[in-house]
Amino acid sequence: MFGLEERTLVTPREMKECERLLASRGLTVPGNESVILGFFEEERLVATGSLVGNILQGIAVDRELEGEGVAATVTSALLKKAMQMGRRQLFLYSKPDEAKRFEALGFTLLATATVERTGLGASLLEWGSEGIDKWRAAIATKAEGGPEGAGVAVVNCNPFTLGHYRLLEYAAARTPRLYVLVVEEDRSLFPFDVRFRLVKEGVSGLENVVALRGGPYVISSATFPSYFTRIESGEEERITELYAALDIELFGRYVASALKATERFVGTEPYCPVTSIYNRMMKERLPKGGEGWPPVRVHEMPRFEMEGMPVSASRVRSLIREDRMEDVRPLVPESTWKWIVSDEALPVIEKIRNSESRH
């Protein structure tokens, strides 16, 4: 394995070779502005690996070099590249039977999940000083002195609507304390700081509700990448089920246990196929509990409707896109409406009108 030449792959010929090598291992070339490294033996590509955001992907080694430590060389090179780019927390997916190989390189195993229906399985690992145990300890402080049997709702709120309020009002009436985790990944048209503020303002009248930042382990691009992309039927749906299973395992093991939660509240999803799959997987898995965490009951509330149509954030964004602001006002709380018509909102409103993103 010694003497391999490392290069950043950029030319069409190199990318074609990378595609060939990945395909031989059942993988595809990562997208989304990846940094793709290649390792050559006398101009023959024998190993590759990619850095996509803070996720290590597409690590593949020619079968002739298996067991020679090349995968470790690739992983170490990607870690070095990430540190040079200022990235201090990284995630990696592997097959469950390969997780220990990466643990030996300093990664921490977060969760392993298998979807029985498809036979697909995966492990999620992380690397870095700001690990999940520190994050769990931080959110656990929010539950100190709090009641057992709390409830949790995970929301994106892009933006916060009366539909969200009705769900949280419903949940708050059925649990001694409700923790609302707002997805922190900043991939939505409404920035996270705005979404978080509007949630806090929107639930301020519900005395037993606590709004929390979702952090990097609650539906982030690292733990649930399918949430931020469109899916079609077939293979994409199967992969989404696997990501959902991993996210649910993370929720039970680290979030529910930290917040002393035994209830999870969701709304029905008429529009987004990813969220619909996620809801189904939660209802199948959370009530069973898992290693180190108790069963969590899932409450699925029908979407709040007005004039026969569900009140959703996507509907609000569509109305903004169509410049039908008078139709937006009845669908959102007063605090959300005041922000939408403020000068601060002008860049966001313009972005919505020029975007077709579902987020």
Image (spheres, grey):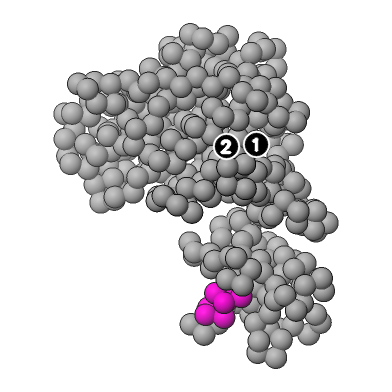
CA neighbours of label 1 inside 10 A, class few (<14), some (14 to 19), many (20+) = many
Disc 2 marks which amino acid?
A: Val
Question: Which percent across, then down, holds residue 46?
Answer: 68, 79
Which numbered disc, 1 or 2, marks the residue closer to the eye?
A: 1
For disc 2, the marked residue is 218
Residue drawn at the location 58% of the way across and 19% of the way down: 297
- Which of 173 and 145 lies nearest the eye of the viewer? 173
For disc 1, the marked residue is 250
Question: Which percent across, then down, holds residue 328?
Answer: 22, 29
Question: Which percent across, then down, holds residue 227?
Answer: 47, 44
Say which element carries label 2: loop
- Cα–Cα span, label 1 and label 2: 8 Å
Does the image show residue 37?
Answer: no
Q: Which residues are magenta?
A: 15-21
Question: Which percent across, then down, holds residue 35?
Answer: 57, 68
> Viewed as shown, does residue 309 lie left or right of 202?
left
Residue drawn at the location 80% of the way across and 53% of the way down: 100
Residue drawn at the location 35% of the way across and 23% of the way down: 303
Q: Is residue 20 magenta?
A: yes
> Viewed as shown, does residue 278 lie left or right of 223?
left
Relative to 73, say whether 226 is above or below: above
Picture quadrant where residue 9 is located: bottom right
Image quarter in which the C terminus is found: top left
